[in-house]
């Protein structure tokens, strides 16, 4: 039986339902508007009779990723600082012997101080891995700029380590080739003098690579200008090797043809072969889309 009290109760329930829907819509709209300003949570008191309807917000679109820059790589920066500190310490301990080695290298004077020769030999040997690491960083920068920005190996320091191993293998194999050929053709005194000068030439290359790498990494030197600078270092290195090979082995016998063949077999040919190996290594490491 329909009574006045039943009608009033139904009317009250209808109003309460409309109020709940309106309040829920208000909370939902507020969360959508405030989501762009700051993330927040709407907490409903436990004694509230409102029903919370979930609101689903659309995720934002991802932004453009920042390109990789070697100057912001903490691990490579730490390695460069470590190399610089090592170079300064080694040079401070062997500065006098290095100057004498330079005079002997340029003017052909001879030393008899065994202690200074040992100190200079230590400097040259320590400069070999330093030079290889600098060449590896330069190779990574050049390959990233002109060949590919995406390598299959991550992080970038692993790519630099692979280049480092390749350069170290190149120098060691070239030194082994010189050792075998010189042992067959020349006397022990000449071989000893050549080994000392060979290490000194490599050390000079490492010293000249320091400003190139630091300018390239931290002072935005263009890779085009860096390539010209590296070409100058490479040509100077080969000229010094040619000069010392001539003065040590072939000057007394006027062996013009011999020095040409000697230089092509032990300097030019390994360099061309390693260039092909380096390109193959870069193509192997890059990501092919």
Image: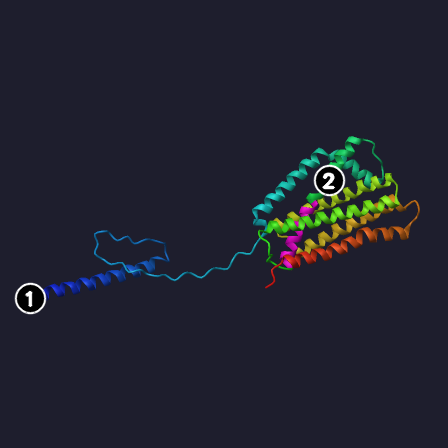
Say what secondary structure mark 2 lies in. Answer: helix
Colour scheme of the rendered structure: rainbow
Q: Outermost residue, front direction?
A: 1
Magenta highlight: main SS: helix
Q: Is residue 90 visible?
A: yes
Residue at horizontal 62 percent and vertical 41 percent from the top: 82
**Quarter of the C terminus within the rendering:** bottom right
| Magenta span includes 134 | yes
Packing grade of label 1 (10 A; few <14, some 14-19, many >=20) is few
Q: Is residue 247 visible?
A: no
Q: Is residue 150 left or right of residue 262?
A: left
Which percent across, then down, holds residue 119?
75, 34
Q: Residue under circle 1? A: 4
Q: Residue under circle 2? A: 125
- Pick the residue in front: 13 or 248: 13
Q: Is residue 17 left or right of residue 3?
A: right
Q: Outermost residue, bottom direction?
A: 1
Q: Which residues are magenta?
A: 131-146
Residue at horizontal 73 percent and vertical 36 percent from the top: 122
Q: Which mark is residue 90?
A: none
In primary-sequence order, the first of circles 2 and 1 is 1
Which percent across, then down, holds residue 266?
81, 51
Residue at horizontal 36 percent and vertical 57 percent from the top: 35
């Amino acid at each position: 039986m329909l009574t006045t009290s039943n009608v009033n109760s139904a009317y009250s329930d209808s109003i309460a339902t409309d109020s709940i829907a309106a309040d829920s819509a208000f909370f939902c709209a507020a969360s959508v508007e405030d989501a762009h300003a700051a993330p927040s949570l709407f907490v409903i008191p436990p004694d509230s009779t409102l029903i919370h309807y979930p609101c689903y917000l659309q995720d934002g679109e991802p932004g453009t990723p920042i390109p990789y820059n070697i100057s912001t790589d903490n691990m490579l920066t730490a390695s460069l600082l470590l190399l610089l500190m090592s170079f300064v310490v080694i040079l401070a301990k062997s500065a006098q012997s290095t100057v004498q080695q330079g005079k002997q290298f340029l003017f052909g004077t001879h030393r008899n101080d065994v202690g200074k020769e040992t100190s200079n030999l230590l400097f040259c040997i320590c400069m070999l891995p330093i030079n290889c690491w600098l060449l590896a960083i330069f190779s990574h920068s050049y390959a990233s700029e002109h060949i590919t920005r995406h390598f299959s190996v991550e992080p970038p320091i692993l790519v630099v380590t692979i280049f480092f191993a390749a350069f170290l293998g190149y120098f060691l194999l070239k030194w082994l080739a010189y050792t075998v050929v010189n042992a067959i053709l020349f006397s022990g005194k000449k071989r000893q003098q050549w080994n000392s000068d060979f290490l000194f030439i490599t050390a000079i290359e490492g010293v000249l690579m320091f400003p190139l790498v630091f300018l390239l990494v931290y002072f935005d030197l263009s890779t085009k200008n860096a390539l010209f600078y590296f070409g100058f270092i490479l040509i100077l290195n080969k000229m010094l090797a040619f000069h010392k090979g001539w003065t040590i082995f072939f000057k007394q016998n006027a062996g013009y043809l011999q020095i040409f063949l000697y230089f092509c077999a032990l300097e030019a040919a390994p360099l061309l072969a390693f260039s092909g190996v380096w390109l193959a290594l870069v193509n192997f490491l890059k990501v092919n889309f």
